[in-house]
Image: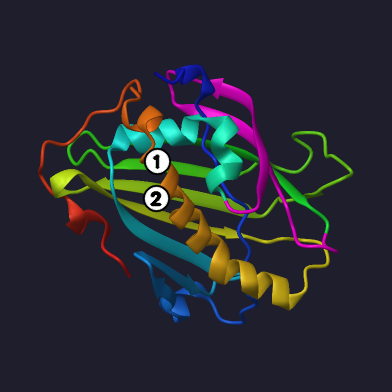
Amino acid sequence: MLRFSKIVLLFCALMAACATVHADEEPWRLSIDRDQVRVWKRAEAGSPIVSFRAETTIHTSLTSLLALFYDLDAAPRWLDHTRRVVALQRDDVKHSYVMLIETEMPWPLKNRDAVIVGHWWQDPASRVVYMRGQAAPRGSYPENPDFQRYYDLRNDWTFVPLADGNVRVIMEGHADPAGNMPAWAVNLLIQESPFATLQNMRNVVVEERYQKAHVQDVNVVQQDAVADLAEAP
């Protein structure tokens, strides 16, 4: 059983390619569709950096997925390019958190970090679990000079329970890498980092310690599919 005191939403700092149109002028565009993972991207309103959406379906449970998120020590095993994740604050009753995540960048780029403020909740009817987070405002937490801090960042996770013991996992977000980020690095990460993260999740969450974990305040669905609540774009 994993301690609820370790609750924290993990987020991999994911990059995006430059764009010049707004999100409401361009639909999601599929960029990767292989090995049971799909990744889309689209323009973000008011930003030259595109947003991403990635999804997969895993034969697992809501509690197993949340237990994986709670296990901070396991973060580098499945969150692509993640060095470490540290819980700074939490509220177990409200399911809210503040966490620091450090992200490795390819040489010669400077590593990034972010302080993420967020919370999670579960819809009582559909049992869908939603996790929402965004970067803490500038000046809220001291910066580490060894890292480039993200301030324009949001991340969403959605776990949709399906029939036959499956869960649709959806990750969606936007992150401006700041600093001197070359286009080749941005393009590479928006294509591959969400894909790698979901592939890693598929491999790690099936481990016995997550499959047998208990998570407080999470209700499960008894074989009633709710797939229509989160269809792919």
**Residue 102 magenta-highlighted:** yes
Q: Main secondary structure of the magenta part?
A: strand
Compare residues 198 and 30 and report the one nearer the observer: 198
Q: Which residue is mark 2?
A: 202
User: Considering the numbered disc 1 on the image, is that residue within a helix, a strand or a loop?
Assistant: loop
> Quarter of the image containing the N terminus?
top left
Q: Quadrant of residue 74?
A: top right
Would you say the residues marked 1 and 2 are in contact, meaning their CB atoms lie under 8 Å apart? yes
User: In this image, 143 relative to 103: left or right?
Assistant: right
First to last magenta residue range = 80-109
> How far, Cα to Cα, is label 1 from label 2?
6 Å
**Front-lying residue, 36 or 85:** 36
Q: How far from the left and from the top, in percent, is residue 48?
A: 65, 74
**Residue 39 screen position, x and y as percent:** 44, 68
Q: Quadrant of the C terminus?
A: bottom left
**Residue drawn at point x = 53 percent, y = 66 percent:** 51
